[in-house]
């Protein structure tokens, strides 16, 4: 079964700093990739997704992620974070043609004003 | 925009009691899921459900757990005899193709 690794457990940044959160998955076949965000006290919301095509995908709120197949990675980036980006970020993967999704452990992002 | 709903938002129960967590998936979706998130930990897959049967379940989903789609709209998770370690946030999700839509979750507290 596929698995997902998020190496950064807690990231602390100041406003306007650039963000990159790592995500690596293990599965040899075709995958669908997702980033979800969970704001404090709220449920999971989809930030962006990759199914096929351009490996650089843009999501909501200025986030983007790049799929690098050779590195089995799908890192999340944002050029300039805001205090309101403080949240937990989860990378997830599902196998192509299979709906079952597996999540990484999550990365807590704290943005200091 | 259609959304997944879950009730109740918070359920408190005593150890050994049965609980049923309810979910109403998006109406034209075909695949349904339950996930669990213990406080401070990652989201864990419990079970997926398609065509009125379980399609996959994790090792967490033991005999104490069951799922049901009793009618055309509800999707329920039952825990027969709750344990303290079942305390968690339980998320329901549904999808038509590959993107899953999550409900707001039910916080289960077992005392």
Image (spheres, coloured by chain):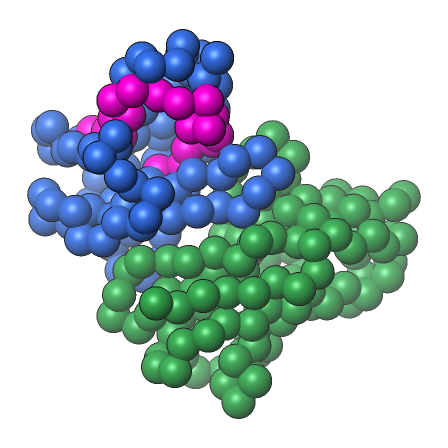
Chain colours: A green, B blue
Between A51 and B14, the one nearer to me in the picture: B14
In reply to whether residue B81 is colored magenta, the answer given is yes
Occupied quadrant, residue A11: bottom right
Q: Is residue B43 above or below residue B12?
A: below
Picture mark count: 0
Q: Is residue A19 above or below residue B15?
A: below
Residue B106 seen in this snapshot: no
Q: Left of A110 or right of it: where is B50?
A: left
Name the spot of residue B53 as percent of width and height, x first. 11, 45
Nearer to the camera, A53 or B77: B77
- Is residue B104 in view from this perspective? yes
The percent position of residue A16, horizontal first and vertical second, equals 87, 58
Residue drawn at (28%, 16%) of the image: B18
User: Which of B68 and B41 lies nearest the eye of the viewer?
Assistant: B41
- Image x and y of residue A77, in percent: 69, 67
**In the image, what residue occupies the spot 88% across and 45% down?**
A112
Relative horizontal placement of residue B43, taking residue B1 as reference (left or right): right
The residues colored magenta run B74-94
Residue that appears at 64% across and 47% down: A88
Report whether B7 appears left or right of A105.
left
Give the residue displayed 23% in from the left and 53% down from the top.
Answer: B56
**Image quadrant in which you'd find residue A86:** top right
Q: Which quadrant is home to the N terminus of chain B?
A: top left
Residue A100 drawn in magenta: no
Asked if A23 appears above or below A113 in the picture, the reply is below
Tell me residue B7's x, y (percent).
36, 21
């Amino acid at each position: 079964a596929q698995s997902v690794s998020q190496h950064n457990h807690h990231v602390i940044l100041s406003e306007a700093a650039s963000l990159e959160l790592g995500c690596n998955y293990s599965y040899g076949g075709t995958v669908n990739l997702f980033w979800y965000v969970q704001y404090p006290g709220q449920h999971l919301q989809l930030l962006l997704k990759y199914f096929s095509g351009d490996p650089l995908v843009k999501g909501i709120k200025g986030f983007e992620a790049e799929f690098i197949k050779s590195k089995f990675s799908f890192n999340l980036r944002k050029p300039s974070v805001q205090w309101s980006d403080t949240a937990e970020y989860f990378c997830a993967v599902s196998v192509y043609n299979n709906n079952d999704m597996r999540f990484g452990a999550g990365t807590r992002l704290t943005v200091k004003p | 925009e259609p959304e997944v709903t879950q009730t109740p938002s918070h359920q408190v129960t005593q150890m050994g009691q049965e609980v049923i967590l309810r979910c109403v998936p998006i109406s034209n979706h075909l695949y349904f899921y339950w996930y669990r998130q213990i406080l401070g930990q990652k989201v864990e897959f419990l079970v997926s459900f398609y065509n009125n049967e379980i399609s996959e379940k994790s090792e967490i989903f033991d005999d104490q757990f069951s799922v049901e789609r009793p009618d055309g709209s509800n999707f329920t998770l039952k825990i027969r005899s709750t344990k303290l370690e079942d305390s968690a946030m339980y998320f329901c999700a549904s999808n038509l193709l590959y993107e899953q839509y999550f409900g707001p979750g039910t916080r289960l507290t077992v005392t």
